[in-house]
């Protein structure tokens, strides 16, 4: 028996507008691609503003400040420390290499700031747990910046699954491949910066599988390493034998993949459009027929997680109900086990 949909054949969401969320004064640590996307989303689509930026590279931080109208620039040694101590900063967004996330998050928490940490949250589960425990003790809101979970098509996919539109889930698959030029000193390939395809790209398909199937009972990983010892490519299987379900996550630095994802149920499936991790469409397919299409494209898309963060922080909460601490810890634990099987160890672990 198939579920009855509560939406027309083509539908859009009536989510709360990001502009309706309370404003926050942000300090941004990092000035690269992710920090730029965060700024463009926040400034164009929310009431939040960026009051300070910190980067060790003064040239990049000054360019960032000029591009986004940021008044306070901190650069050089101690830049992050000076930013988190700024009384005008209410929340801190961390967009630096994974190897710095723990240290910088703890700095912000100690200063009493709410913290949004770019994924992967930290290098490993132990570091993630340390950050989360510190935030809970300090009573500040901390969240992993898995923006995908907040996008309209993912909200709709969870609704469809919850209402039984595809029946019991048996398999979730997703891939994410990119092809950065090999540079042993880059954040992609340097083990001291916690490089590798898994933490950079694989976190997306693994988090997607976790979103719909939860914490796996077993993990299996196969792949290959780059000359620097970080992972170059991997396929990670998340097994749920008690649920008769499985997830398959593929990530690679060798090629640009299609970046597709599918949720397969016993009564149908949900196919996501290209680049499922960003704003895209979904199709509900049952009995070989496309029953329903959801397509609510939106510019940028990071504004949904920024707005959710602002609402939760203003309510005095310490974690998100969409990206809770347990989800971050579960995903980190999966990646720890995958790295163990692949033989990837970061310096100092």
Image (spheres, helix red, strand yellow):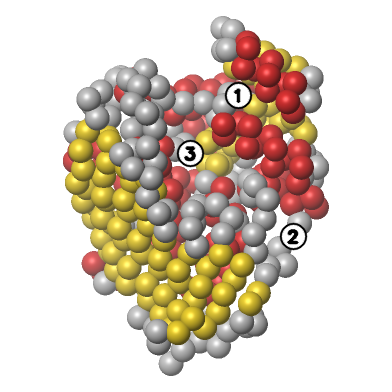
In the picture shown, does residue 275 fall above or below 69?
below
In the picture shown, does residue 140 fall above or below 262?
above
Q: N-terminal of the two: label 1 or label 2?
A: 2
In the picture shown, does residue 19 fall above or below 71?
below
Mark 1: few/some/many CA within 10 Å (<14, 14-19, 20+): many
Image coordinates for residue 348, horizontal then vertical, percent: 30, 19
SS at circle 3: loop
Q: Would you name the residue on which mark 2 appears?
A: 16
Q: Which of 84/161 is in front? A: 161
Q: N-terminal of the two: label 3 or label 1?
A: 1
Residue drawn 41% across and 80% down? 268
Mark drawn on residue 31 = 1
Image coordinates for residue 55, horizontal then vertical, percent: 60, 17
Q: Dividing the picture into quarters, in which one does residue 50 lie?
A: top right
Q: Image check: 85 left or right of 338?
A: right
Q: Which of 90/11 is in front? A: 11
SS at circle 1: loop
Q: Nearer the viewer, mark 1 or mark 2?
A: 1
Q: Quadrant of the C terminus?
A: top left
Q: Dividing the picture into quarters, in which one does residue 280 lie?
A: bottom right
Mark 2: few/some/many CA within 10 Å (<14, 14-19, 20+): few
Q: N-terminal of the two: label 3 or label 2?
A: 2
- In this orientation, does residue 217 appear? no
Mark 3: few/some/many CA within 10 Å (<14, 14-19, 20+): many
Q: Would you name the residue on which mark 3 appears?
A: 119
As measured in the structure, the alpha-carbon distance from the residue carrying label 1 to the one carrying label 2 is: 29 Å
The residue at the far top in this view is 77
SS at circle 2: loop
Q: Image check: 208 left or right of 85?
A: left
Q: Looking at the image, how many numbered discs can be counted on the residues? A: 3
């Amino acid at each position: 028996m198939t579920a009855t949909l509560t939406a027309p054949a083509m539908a859009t969401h009536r989510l709360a507008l990001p502009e309706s969320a309370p404003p926050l004064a942000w300090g941004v640590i990092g000035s690269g691609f992710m920090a730029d996307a965060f700024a463009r989303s926040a400034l164009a689509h929310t009431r939040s503003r960026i009051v300070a930026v910190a980067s060790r590279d003064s040239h990049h931080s000054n360019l960032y400040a000029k591009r986004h109208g940021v008044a306070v620039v901190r650069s050089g040694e101690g830049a992050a420390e000076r930013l988190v101590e700024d009384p005008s900063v209410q929340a801190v967004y961390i967009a630096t290499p994974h190897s710095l996330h723990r240290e910088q998050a703890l700095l912000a928490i100690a200063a009493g700031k709410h913290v949004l940490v770019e994924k992967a949250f930290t290098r490993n589960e132990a570091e993630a747990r340390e950050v989360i425990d510190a935030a809970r003790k300090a009573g500040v809101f901390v969240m992993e910046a898995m923006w995908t979970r907040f996008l309209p098509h993912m909200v709709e996919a969870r609704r469809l699954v919850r209402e039984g539109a595809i029946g019991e889930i048996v398999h979730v698959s997703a891939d994410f491949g990119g092809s950065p030029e090999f540079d042993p000193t880059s954040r992609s390939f340097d083990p001291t910066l916690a490089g590798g395809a898994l933490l950079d790209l694989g976190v997306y398909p693994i988090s997607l599988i976790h979103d719909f199937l939860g914490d796996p009972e077993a993990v299996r990983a196969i792949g290959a390493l780059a000359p620097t010892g970080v992972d170059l490519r991997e396929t990670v299987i998340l097994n749920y034998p008690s649920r008769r379900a499985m997830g398959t996550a593929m990530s690679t630095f060798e090629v640009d993949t299609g970046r597709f994802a599918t949720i397969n149920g016993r009564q149908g499936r949900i196919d996501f459009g290209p680049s499922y991790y960003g704003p895209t469409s979904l199709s509900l397919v049952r009995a070989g027929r496309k029953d329903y299409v959801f397509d609510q494209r939106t510019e940028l898309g990071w504004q949904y997680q920024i707005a959710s963060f602002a609402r939760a922080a203003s309510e005095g909460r310490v974690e998100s109900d969409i990206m809770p601490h347990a989800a971050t810890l579960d995903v980190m634990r999966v990646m720890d086990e995958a790295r163990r099987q692949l033989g990837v160890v970061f310096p100092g672990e």
